[in-house]
Amino acid sequence: TEYETILVEQRGRVGWITLNRPQALNALNGQVADEVAAAASAFDVDEGVGAIVVTGSEKAFAAGADIKEMEGMTSAEMLSTDHFGAWREFAAVRTPVIAAVAGYALGGGCELAMMCDIILSADSAKFGQPEINLGVIPGMGGTQRLIRAVGYYKAAELVLSGRIIGADEAERIGLVSRVVPAADLLAEATALAETIASKSLPSVYAAKATLDAAMETPLAEGLAAEKVAFAELFDTADQKEGMAAFREKRPPHFVHR
Ligand code: HXC
């Protein structure tokens, strides 16, 4: 497939999607959304891919939804074209996705990072939801996922004030899992993605699906979903292999079945 706004590459069992609109600091227009969703979905149906990394440039992960594309739109157009719909497809992939963030992750850029399962942050990263400065609000999940990540009061301050935060604050409030020197970001993302991709694919899918369920369900319902997902894995070859390998004191050889 030919992509114009992203670079797509598979290295081993890891699928890489690099946002590549440097002239607009990787602003997320409709074409970027369609291409990221298509690339992620293609990796998602490939059993040779066990983890996906989404990254940008040193200067910008993504500086937001494309303001120039949205500026002239009406409410009716926004709704009828389902302007951010492709991102739902991206957020629904079953393969774990790591956002490797350097530079600006603002507005839709921060929201894209939050659609991923793990956010690795360079020390250069800047996160925020500055939509309020444009006379709008976050529109790609920022009001919902940010609260679930950092709690109501931090999210409310960030969404209402538009304040931009650095990597250390983002780590302190629980938005990012780890801050690394900018020069090490891609190596750290590679190591983490390869670690995840080395696990048994059925258990990785089940882990992501069950973690996702926790965002949506009351505790009892989530625990019931976990019970079923846990039990289902006992029909996989990899569960027998993983537990035999433990007993035999050797590394497991997973076949992803
Ligand atoms: C379209 C953008 C853009 C964006 C940057 N550019 N962000 N184009 N949409 N979100 C373009 C600029 O217009 C400029 O193009 C080029 O990228 C370089 O940007 P500069 O502003 O010159 O760079 P710099 O001075 O380094 O400032 C970086 C910045 C600033 C602080 C990140 O670009 C900025 O504030 N961007 C907007 C951030 C923002 O408000 N994001 C939220 C977007 S709304 P030219 O052609 O002039 O060189 C959003 C809503 C999501 O995400 C949900 C739906 C409502």
Image (cartoon, rainbow, N blue to C red):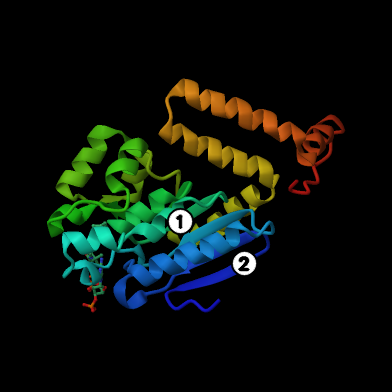
Please state which of residues 140 and 11 is positioned toward the viewer in this rendering. 140
Residue 99 vs 210, above or below: the answer is below
Confirm whether residue 26 shows in the render.
no
x, y percent for residue 99: 46, 55
Secondary element at tag 2: strand
Please state which of residues 234 and 170 is positioned toward the viewer in this rendering. 234
Please state which of residues 12 and 209 is positioned toward the viewer in this rendering. 209
Question: On residue 89, which mark appears?
Answer: 1
x, y percent for residue 21: 37, 74
Left/right placement of residue 185 relative to residue 110 reads right
Amino acid at circle 1: Glu
Quadrant that contains the N terminus: bottom right
Residue in view at x 22 percent, y 67 percent: 70
x, y percent for residue 252: 79, 42
x, y percent for residue 60: 35, 65
Secondary element at tag 1: helix
Question: On residue 10, which mark appears?
Answer: 2
Confirm whether residue 14 shows in the render.
yes
Instruction: Estimate how packed mark 2 is, as few (under 14), some (14 to 19) or many (20 or more) residues with alpha carbons within 10 Å.
Output: some
Residue 240 vs 167, above or below: the answer is above
